[in-house]
Image (spheres, helix red, strand yellow):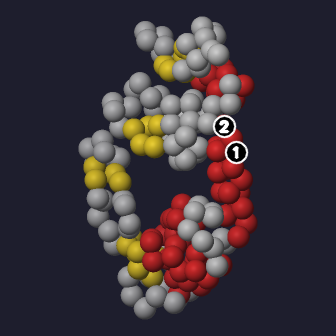
Amino acid sequence: MTNHTISPRTGVLGAYSCDCEADLPDLMSAELHASETNQCTVCLGSAEQPVLPGLAPGISRGLMRPCTACAATGRRREQIVWELAHAEAEQVITMSLVRGVVAEFGGPFHLSEVADAVRSGLGLPPGRLPVGPRVRDLLLRLQAAGEITMLSAPDELLDGADVVLYRDPQWARTSGL
């Protein structure tokens, strides 16, 4: 059985190599090869992805995290299952649902509190759908619309002050929902 380890090609920016010696001149060809060999097309089978989106694994200066697209398995099947779960979460967890949950809080609230309330309200067991990421995205949209304000300071500076990490950010309502 041929091993298919895809990684950035040394000395050629944007090109990739595979142990099977396939020609992978760019990211698109590397993603296609990963798909054809049943590997995750986001992490290219490594089970890790850069913390800073858009940076190739070899360029991210060690800032890696478990791949969220394939649940850190490196496999295509898990990636597809997780993509379907994200799509289902987008249909089930709506802006009006999150806005209603936020309206119930009398004071500041954490992302985890809103996600737990949504999960409980929908009767979802933990791990059934990516509730946290969906709720986070909707809370950020509410923040952009000026309906809530983030109160948290970053938990970690990843690349100076330009790239920060919030583990469980806290918000407060700014207007009547």
User: In the rendered image, is residue 28 in sight?
Assistant: no
Q: Depth check: give the residue in front, 1 or 83.
A: 1
Residue 12 to residue 155: above or below: above
- Image coords of residue 35 (percent x, y): 69, 29
- Residue at position x 64%, y 44% from top? 78
Q: Amino acid at mark 1?
A: Ile
Residue 147 to residue 20: above or below: below
Residue 19 to residue 109: above or below: above
Snapshot quadrant of residue 94: bottom right
Identify the disc placed on residue 175: none
Instruction: Please indicate whether residue 91 sits to the left or right of residue 12 in the image.
Output: right
Q: Residues within 10 Å of mark 1 (few under 14, many from 20)?
A: some
Snapshot quadrant of residue 106: bottom left
Q: Depth check: give the residue in front, 84 or 139.
A: 84
Check whether the beta carbons of the residues at disc 1 and disc 2 lie within 8 A of each other: yes
Q: Secondary structure at mark 2?
A: helix
Mark 1–mark 2 distance (CA, rounded to whole Å)? 6 Å
Q: Depth check: give the residue in front, 22 or 13.
A: 22
- Residue at position x 71%, y 53% from top? 84
- Image coords of residue 155 (percent x, y): 29, 59
Identify the disc placed on residue 76: 2
Snapshot quadrant of residue 138: bottom right
Residue 83 to residue 98: above or below: above
Q: Amino acid at mark 2?
A: Arg
Q: How many marks?
A: 2
Q: Quadrant of the C terminus?
A: bottom right
Write down the residue under mark 1: 80
Q: Secondary structure at mark 1?
A: helix
- Residue at position x 41%, y 24% from top? 58
